[in-house]
Amino acid sequence: MPPLLILDRDGVINFDSDDFIKSADEWQPIPFSLAAIAQFKRAGWLVAVATNQSGIARGYYDRLALRAMHRKLNQLLVSEFNVQLDWLCYAPYLSDQPNVARKPLTGMLRQISLTLNRPLQQQIMVGDTLADIQAAQAVGMRPYLVRSGKGERTLAAHPELAKHLPVYDDLAAVAAGLLTQSKE
């Protein structure tokens, strides 16, 4: 069975903003993040995205704008690397209105598991926030934290994380580390 990689979006694949990413024009990939996804795909991994998108509930953008962002992501993956994501899901809910889909809860991860027919235990999730780490741990995944996006803030607020999980600069560094390990 191919390994499964679940990625957070903002701060892992694309630049994040405290003002939210509200359009396809604002959605810009972090350098080498798309190449990293392509490396995983070419190595035989399933790659999915699980992203909290509370900007919809806040009225900053609508589902059409979000679809345009995701279309841009997929078009760049296809045009530049000839690969596609295996699945992408999002939770459009506010953090103070918990919904089973919104991380740190596990609904999106379970949806990915069911959709791709893959167990989550011991699979890898890459994120930049405590909610990403907590969601991954709750379903028995192996969380990896990146310093990109909100990762540095996450580490500053929770320095103990660096003692308990792999921490990388960005998704490209995760790919370099994991794909080298899997070849050995």
Image (spheres, rainbow, N blue to C red):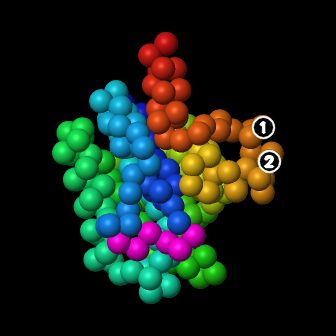
Identify which residue, 33 or 97, lies in the foreground: 33
Q: Which mark is residue 109?
A: none
Identify which residue, 166 or 65, lies in the foreground: 65
- Horizontal and vertical percent for residue 154? 70, 55
- Name the residue beneath numbered marker 2: 159
Name the residue located 20 percent from the left edge and 39 percent from the top edge.
Answer: 82
Residue 88, can we see it? Answer: yes
Q: Which mark is residue 163?
A: 1
Disc 2 residue type? Pro
Disc 2: CA contacts within 10 A as few (<14), some (14-19) or many (>=20): few
Location of the N terminus by quadrant is: top left
Q: How many marks?
A: 2
Range of residues picked out in magenta? 18-23
For the residues marked 1 and 2, what is the alpha-carbon distance in whole angstroms? 8 Å
Name the image quarter holding residue 38.
top left
- Horizontal and vertical percent for residue 122? 55, 37
Name the residue located 47 percent from the left edge and 77 percent from the top edge.
Answer: 55
- Horizontal and vertical percent for residue 117? 35, 46
* In this view, 54 is above or below 169: below
- Residue at the extreme right: 160
Q: Is residue 157 magenta?
A: no
- CB-based contact (under 8 Å), mark 1 and mark 2: yes
* In this view, 68 is above or below 161: below
